[in-house]
Image (spheres, rainbow, N blue to C red):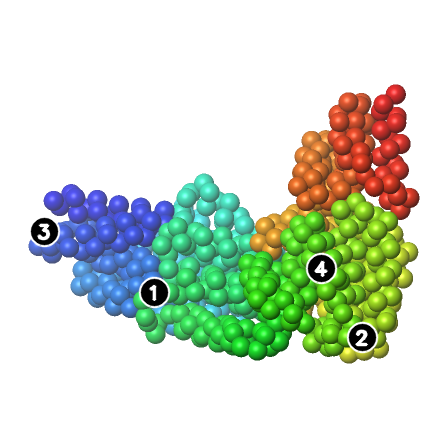
Amino acid sequence: MPRGLGRTPRFGTTCLYFGDFVDAHEHFQKTVELYDPSRHGDFANRFGTDPRAAAEIFDALALWVLGRVDEALPLAERALADAGSAAHAPTVASVLQYAALLGLVRCNAEAVATCSRALADIASRYDLPAGWAGVAAFFLGWAKWSDGAEGSRLAEMRRGLAIVRESGNIVRLPSFEAALAEAEASAGETDVGLRRLDDALAELERTEERWCEAEMHRIRGEILLKRGPADTAAAEQSLQVAIAIAQSQKARSFELRAALCLAKLYRAANRDADAHAVLAPAAEGFPPTRQFPELTEAQTLLAALSERDALSRELASREDASERFSAYHSLWGRHLSRGEPAPMREMAELLLRDAAAQPDCPETLIAHHISGCNCLQFGDFAAAHQHFQKTVELYDPTRHGDLANRFGQDSRAAAKILDALTVWVLGRVDDSLRLADRALADAESAGHVATMGHALAYAAFLALFRCNPAAVATYSQAVADIVSRYDFPAYWAGIAVFLQGRAMSRLAEMRGGLAIYREQGRIWLLPEAVLAEAEASAGETEAGLRRLDDALAGLQRTEERLYEAEMHRIRGEILLKRDPANTAAAEQSLQAAIAVAQSQKARSFETRAALSLAKLYHAADRGADAHAVLAPAVEGFPPTQQFPELTEGQALISVLSR
């Protein structure tokens, strides 16, 4: 039995080291249960620390991470008392050290300062190894930085960390590195902190000291957000990783802290549904306590999110059909701007259900318009075309002329310009251009400024799809003129600046316009891909590739598949530009572009990607492969003089057929 007690806290410490908090708690509990002062009092001298006091302070840390905060804090106090009773300097030092670490993860500067000063005193009076003094110096520096009383104290933290490293004891180093990285970023040394944290995460893969891994990813997300507030994708990813790790470890406190950070990021971007979805599970069932401020903050935020959602649902449940359509439309627009596919589908389904129940209702065509927009967003071009056609068929100027003021645009003109974009992607190029002209004429006849701005903006995007910079310049300038003359929301200015920048190949303007758009809490991945292509064309190949990869990652969440095939094609072109001799990765991206386009019946995107891949094969003397990939894309494509890729593809087919 005595030897078993000696092993039990070691097993618990091992579980804690690897981030297995549940098993660690069980081992520490067993240690305390087995402890008998008369039989185990001498274990402190044999094993380095008194097993009961050591188990209690380790268990306090484990319990706090598990979310059992109000159990953890009294246990830490008991550990300090038992260490004092043991009258064994290394035991007191060890318990003080982990009490300070518990204070650090709690973000309690006062507790860390008290414990670290006592630790420094013990280390100095009993001539303990230098590593103890280093730990005390680090914690004291952190406490001073945390309460802001004496500057950042980065030098003290770095000095303490250096002493710990020199002592050869690397246990706890990941938590020290993460705390110092956070302090460095807070003091303005953002890149220094990020490098330190990335190095610590890399080292963690070797040591597997995972007890604070979730916190390391959370801190990384916070630092990335500090470095680039307008570009949240990487920060979002780090916070999602932090939550996933915490969930796998049942680390409720770390999970809630990371979820709160991510929910606040989403709330700032007007993504309330995402904020609620990530925060509610983390807060639900969390043991009530007043000693964990993040819980109170999370509950307050959830209450605000639920109140807003309840209001929205109340609007949508009104008996008056006209009011319901307006509420659904408003909710759909909000979800669209935030890139939230599930509620977008829900709102469209509710609209179509109401429309089916009341086919004579004037707002029925709004249901088809919204459904068409959804289908276009999600890359279902054939269904989008059908809904836009139905919108135009239903339109009656005498019944629907006033809907522009209620729903933001004239339904007929808006449906026609979006359908023009849709049928162009489907390969019906000449039909698309005629339809775009009619849409602009209808927008002008409507005499509604927002309708005109909407039609011009999408006419510019159609020109962008067609790779026609002169038309992009013309339409985007017209958008800019309308925005400057009328009090349009700021994101319109962002669209105009972005499009003008693209027309003139000015990266700074494109980035500025996109930043304006993002600052309004709006998410749209298509411009990211367009900017990535422009960056690569200007020689900023790596920047373009990173931007495009981030956009492709974001697409998995938003399901914005309108431009997905082009995103893969552009990626292939960038990879080929970066390394012309190594074509494998580029070939894979172009094959992905073709596969996506075929699944979407996006004939124009398919032909463009197939032409790029055929040219790659032709340059590599793979004529048969070039013909095999290009011929199906060109065959049956509606004849037109307005799609240069078709002419070029047909010419290349002729060469390959010789």
N-terminal of the two: label 2 or label 4? 4
Mark 2 vs mark 4, CA separation in Å: 22 Å
Q: Which of the marked residues, 3 or 2, is nearer the chain's N terminus?
A: 3
Mark with earlier residue (1, 4):
1
Q: Secondary structure at mark 2?
A: loop
The alpha-carbon separation of the residues under discs 3 and 2 comes to 89 Å
Report helix, strand or loop for mark 3.
helix
Label drawn at residue 285: 1
Q: Position of residue 536 (x, y in %)?
A: 77, 47
- Return the disc, 1 or 2, that comes first in the chain's sequence: 1
Look at the numbered disc 4 and give the secondary structure of its residue. Answer: helix
Q: Is 257 above or below relative to 173?
A: below
Residue 299 place in picture, x, y as percent:
42, 72
Question: Is 456 placed left or right of 26 in the picture?
Answer: right
Q: Amino acid at mark 4?
A: Lys
Which corner quadrant of the image does residue 512 belong to? bottom right
Q: Specify the quadrant of the image occupied by residue 120.
A: bottom left
Decide: few, some or many residues near mark 2? Use Cα within 10 Å; few <14, some 14-19, many ≥20.
some
